[in-house]
Amino acid sequence: MLTEAIQYAATSLVTPKQFRPFIRSSVSLWSRAGRCAKDWAAHEESCKAFIRETIAGMKQRRTAVVLGSGLLRDVPIEDLSAKFDTVVLVDLVHLASVRMRLKAGRFKNVRLVSRDLSGFDDAVTAKVPEPLSFLRQVPYLDLVVSANILSQIGVGSKRRLDAGRNPARDDILQTVVRAHLDGLSALPCRTALITDTAYRVTDRGGQVLEEADLLCGVPAPVAKRAWTWPVAPYGELGKDYQAVHDVIAL
Ligand SMILES: C[S@@+](CC[C@H](N)C(=O)[O-])C[C@H]1O[C@@H](n2cnc3c(N)ncnc32)[C@H](O)[C@@H]1O
């Protein structure tokens, strides 16, 4: 509790005002990631391996952008920093502990950007969202990694819509998910998309108690790799059930 409070307070000091409401969920993700470190390790390693594999064959490595960089748990920041001239990390929030880690590691070519990548505000006013259009302004862009953010764009947008009971809810959710996928496909550089697509809550007998699509009805793109991620292992939500997410990478 105390470390969470310190993390919260220290992050508030360095986070622009409009992004401070998101610090709480970043701190709670950080706490859960700490508790579930052993169970998340294989997933995190698969993500890092996929990103390393993506950059291995690249001839030009000038600027890399990571969308949803967050806690930097599933992003091989050492490799990216060593192999690219500049690395730009984009998220709603970068916690104080992440900033300290970057400072301690002397990642001098790494920049942090606070930004809402959802396109939600345009989607609710029936405008075509282009949440990744800012990438067109990034000089010498050679790589964009979407690092486990897409499902969270859907989850965050759902939360905001459920508070207001918008009748166009499902269309808006599909719009923001599609905007991210279309934005990535339109980029003139190498891209890597890693996202969870669905989850299941099961009991110890393997019976499915609850399941849901995390891409809000938008078909998942064809995966190059796929694995599962025990986001809430036994004991996290309840002692007799677990929540497992399906993850794809392409
Ligand atoms: C599952 S975490 C990703 C973890 C991260 N890749 C890592 O290595 O630790 C999802 C991340 O997406 C970010 N996120 C969620 N919605 C966002 C939005 N609309 N714009 C920008 N970032 C967002 C969250 O702040 C969080 O850091």
Image: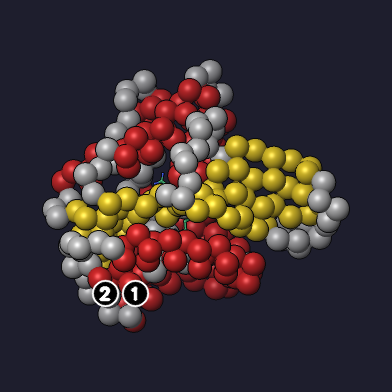
What is the number of callouts on the image?
Answer: 2
Q: Nearer the viewer, residue 53 or 23?
A: 53
Name the residue carrying label 2: 82
| SS under mark 1 | helix
Q: Relative to residue 55, is residue 72 drawn left or right?
A: right
Give the percent coordinates (x, y) of residue 218: 50, 31
The residue under the point 38% across, 38% down is 181
The residue under the point 51% across, 33% down is 219
Residue 78: give its label.
Answer: 1
Residue 8 visible to an observer of this rendering: no
Q: Relative to residue 56, is residue 198 drawn left or right?
A: right
Residue 106 visible to an observer of this rendering: yes
Placement of 246 over or under 84, stated as above or below: above
The answer for how far apart the CA atoms under marks 2 and 1 are is 6 Å
Q: Relative to residue 137, is residue 163 drawn left or right?
A: right
Instruction: In the displayed orientation, state which residue is furthest to the right.
Output: 205
Placement of 7 over or under 135, stated as above or below: below
Label 2, ligand 1: CB separation under 8 Å:
no
Q: Amino acid at mark 1?
A: Glu
| SS under mark 2 | helix
Placement of 177 over or under 79, stated as above or below: above
Q: Nearer the viewer, residue 132 or 12?
A: 132
Q: Nearer the viewer, residue 125 or 50?
A: 50
Give the percent coordinates (x, y) of residue 165: 56, 24
Q: Would you say the residues marked 2 and 1 are in contact, meaning their CB atoms lie under 8 Å apart?
A: yes
Badge 1 density bin: few <14, some 14–19, many ≥20, Cα 10 Å:
few
Q: Amino acid at mark 2?
A: Ala
